[in-house]
Image (spheres, helix red, strand yellow):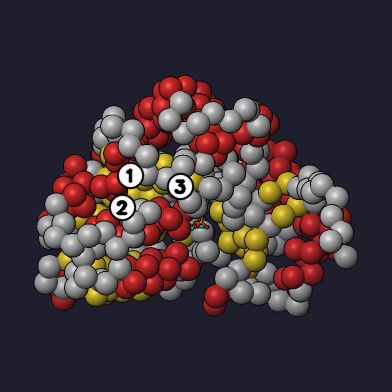
């Protein structure tokens, strides 16, 4: 066969819904020499990753580590380990990822009660309280904290309390929220959480940080039936990520190098400062968009700082604008999904990409394209 030339990717500014831009030191970390997945140096690094993940999630949960796979693997990890066939669960659905979680939970054998809100709006405590009246023994109540498909941030503290009062576990998707806005596992009493590396942690996609509270760990370890997924079974994974170091699967070595560096950078910046930076750049973008006559369309008061859903003005070709941004300015932004297809653009200001100069660059490019 004709052997293609070595791949030489263009240099883009990643302002979409993820992956986000990665710091040069994270890419450098990933180019370090390989060691074995049981090498003492790697094992030491695994312990540092676990400790740093606890600091990022603001938790003392012992069962905190990165699952091999993207954010969806973390979603499957939580569902597969907590659900036994026939269990009832309640899931908030206000976008693509709540919808996906229902599918995953059903595949694990759960009977799912969906609590639905219009895309772009949040799930309210009252909706969850109403659903709990209809479900006799829910295993968990689950929410997507930051709905990347719509740009809405659902407040979770009160919902967590309602779930706990009903003796249900509380599961939270923090794929887009972690390290971009407050996520406080222990304060909010979150029992099971998963995230992704490629959003506000600014590491390439490939790992899903997860954490289980002691309550959730007990449910997962004392279940009657085997976890339906061998690869994601916490009972097996914990023997590798715990002190026994029993081989389970070959850890993606260089992905873990990258995550280690990305976590170091996030903690060196400080969580509060990192959240503040995301908020300030969101406000700057919002103001600049208003000057261009553009509007963020997700629910007022609950808009994400790291992902902005912008209404496409009438008469403007949504796709043509995105294509020009990429071709002429090397800027990637996202499209709307599902019912929002063609109606919104999604501009991500996540992690490394949340910078004043990036806000100015994308606003300037949009201005020129819309003028044309
Ligand atoms: C909120 C949310 N949950 C889950 C996922 C799935 O993550 P991944 O695409 O890394 O599998 C995403 C990805 O965009 C997401 O934004």
Task: Tell me if residue 348 can be seen.
Answer: no
234 over 127 or under it: above or below: above
Crowdedness of circle 1 by 10 Å Cα count: few (<14), some, many (20+)? Answer: some
Horizontal arrangement in the rendering, residue 24 relative to residue 156 (left or right): right
Horizontal arrangement in the rendering, residue 49 relative to residue 277 (left or right): left
Could you tell me residue 176's position as x and y percent? Answer: 48, 51
As measured in the structure, the alpha-carbon distance from the residue carrying label 3 to the one carrying label 1 is 10 Å
Q: Are marks 1 and 2 in contact (CB under 8 Å)?
A: yes
Task: Give me the disc on residue 170.
Answer: none
Mark 2 sits on what residue?
A: 233
Mark 1 sits on what residue?
A: 237
* Secondary structure of the residue carrying numbered label 3: strand
Horizontal arrangement in the rendering, residue 183 relative to residue 358 (left or right): left
Give the mark nearest the N terminus, 2 or 3: 3
What residue lies at 55% left-to-right and 75% top-to-bottom? 338
Task: Give me the disc on residue 68.
Answer: 3
As measured in the structure, the alpha-carbon distance from the residue carrying label 1 to the one carrying label 2 is 6 Å
Viewer-nearest residue: 147 or 362: 147
Crowdedness of circle 3 by 10 Å Cα count: few (<14), some, many (20+)? Answer: many
What residue lies at 17% left-to-right and 66% top-to-bottom? 138
């Amino acid at each position: 066969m004709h052997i293609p030339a070595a791949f030489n990717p263009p240099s883009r500014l990643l302002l979409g819904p993820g992956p986000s831009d990665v710091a040069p030191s994270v890419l450098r970390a990933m180019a370090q020499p390989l060691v074995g997945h049981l090498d003492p140096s790697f094992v030491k690094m695994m312990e540092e990753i676990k400790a740093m993940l606890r600091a990022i999630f603001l938790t003392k949960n012992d069962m905190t580590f990165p699952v091999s796979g993207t954010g969806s693997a973390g979603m499957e990890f939580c569902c597969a380990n907590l659900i036994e066939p026939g269990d009832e669960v309640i899931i908030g659905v206000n976008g693509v990822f709540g919808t996906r979680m229902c599918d995953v939970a059903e595949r694990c054998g759960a009977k799912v009660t969906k609590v639905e809100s219009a895309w772009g709006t949040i799930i309210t405590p009252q909706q969850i309280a109403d659903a709990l009246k209809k479900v006799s023994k829910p295993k968990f109540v689950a929410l997507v904290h930051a709905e990347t498909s719509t740009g809405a941030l659902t407040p979770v503290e009160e919902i967590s309390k309602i779930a706990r009062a009903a003796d249900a576990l509380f599961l939270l998707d923090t794929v887009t929220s972690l390290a971009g806005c407050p996520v406080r596992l222990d304060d909010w009493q979150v029992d099971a959480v998963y995230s992704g590396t490629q959003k506000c942690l600014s590491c390439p996609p490939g790992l899903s940080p997860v954490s289980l509270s002691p309550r959730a760990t007990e449910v997962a370890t004392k279940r009657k039936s085997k976890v339906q997924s061998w690869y994601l079974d916490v009972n097996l994974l914990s023997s590798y990520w715990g002190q026994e170091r029993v081989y389970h699967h070959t850890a993606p070595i260089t992905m873990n190098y990258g995550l280690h560096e990305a976590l170091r950078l996030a903690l060196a910046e400080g969580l509060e400062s990192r959240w503040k930076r995301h908020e300030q750049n969101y406000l700057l973008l919002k103001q600049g968009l208003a000057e261009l006559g553009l509007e963020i369309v997700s629910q007022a008061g609950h808009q994400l700082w790291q992902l902005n859903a912008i209404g496409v003005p009438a008469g403007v070709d949504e796709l043509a604008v995105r294509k020009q941004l990429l071709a002429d300015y090397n800027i990637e932004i996202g499209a709307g999904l599902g019912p929002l297809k063609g109606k919104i653009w999604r501009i991500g200001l996540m992690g490394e990409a949340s910078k004043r100069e990036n806000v100015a660059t994308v606003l300037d490019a949009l201005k020129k394209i819309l003028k044309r």
